[in-house]
Image (tube, grey):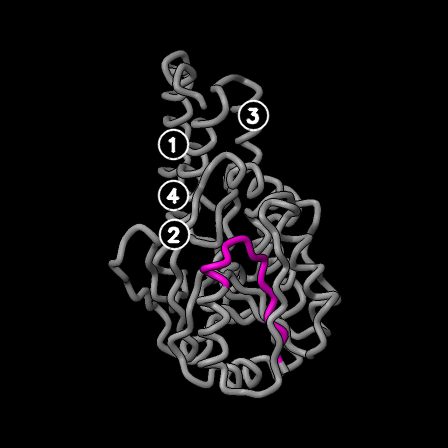
Amino acid sequence: MISIIVSSYQENDFSRFSKSVHETIGIPDFEIIKVWNPNLMSITEAYNLGAEKSKYENLLFVHEDIIFHTENWGEKLTNHLNSPEVGIIGIAGSSYVPVAPSSWTISEKYNAVNIVQSDKENSETEHLQSVHQQKTKVYGVDGVFMAITKENFDTLGFNEDLKGFHGYDLDFSLRAAKNFQNYVVNDILVKHFSKGNRDKKWLDTNIKIKEKIGSNFPHQKNSETEKNIFLSFLYQYFIYYPVNSKNIFFTMKFFPFKHLTFQDKVLILKKYFNYIRFSSEINKKTQ
């Protein structure tokens, strides 16, 4: 009843993942669709290709560098998806969509996470857990684990205009949130052996997503959150792009003006002043 779709490029990771699935899923009707993808195509293309090959009514798009800690998680997942209003089921996401470009990660106040985090170079693990009810409503969902019915997937698909391996999850989950309700669940636990990488490609993709989808979602805006996200965006942007009039005006299109307190507006304008004041020094370090 579940087609598990993986964009794979590490044989050892995939072998460990596949073994974990077979040992823990707990249902007889499942398939693992491996799309071999050592930078042959974007992850959006790989996932759409895998979905085309799937035969079951529930789809799980998942990274190969995970293992499952939960027994019989297959039945739990199908039960979560067995409701027409459900969009994406994930294990990490956020209930807030800011005005400025960002990942799904917003702040502890809005993040909903249930995952064991590690990496390949370090044996230390950390159980990140901020969800204490079975299902928590979210908008953005992390791409490490994204489940959706095939019927609902067919109305969305992954956006193949997004190249590479960044932003596909945010784009997919925010588009799903326009018509369905996404959830993070606390009864399926995985261990993830990666912590991600925020580089220029990540930034550019998130800007592209924000320009297309915007931030008009039905939740109350918070001045402190908007300020912090916007300042983080400015900092990241001027790592890769020079401080000049063109780029300053471009960043200001994401200025959450109407959602900020007067004090926060002043603080951000002072930050702009300092970027301009020290532009020659900053631009020497632009990557």
Q: Earlier in the sequence, mark 1 or mark 4?
A: 4
Mark 2 residue type: Lys
Instruction: Kindly identify the residue that appears in the image at 61 percent across and 52 percent down.
Output: 37
Q: Is residue 98 left or right of residue 228?
A: right
| Separation of marks 2 and 3 at Cα, in angstroms | 33 Å
Q: Nearer the viewer, mark 1 or mark 4?
A: 4
Say which element carries label 3.
Answer: helix
Residue 169 percent location from the top left of the image: 57, 56
**Which one is earlier in the sequence, the residue at label 2 or at label 3?**
2
Mark-to-mark CA distance, 4 and 2: 22 Å
The residue that disc 2 covers is 195
Is residue 97 inside the magenta stretch? no
State the image coordinates of residue 44 (x, y, percent, origin top left).
65, 53
Q: Which residue is the site of mark 4?
A: 228
Between marks 1 and 3 in the image, the one whose residue lies nearer the viewer: 3
**Front-most of residues 153 and 123:** 123
Q: Report the magenta residues as a range.
A: 2-14
Most foreground residue, 48 or 262: 48
Disc 1 target residue: 266
Q: Give the spatial CA distance, label 1 vs label 3.
A: 17 Å
* Residue 262 seen from this side: yes
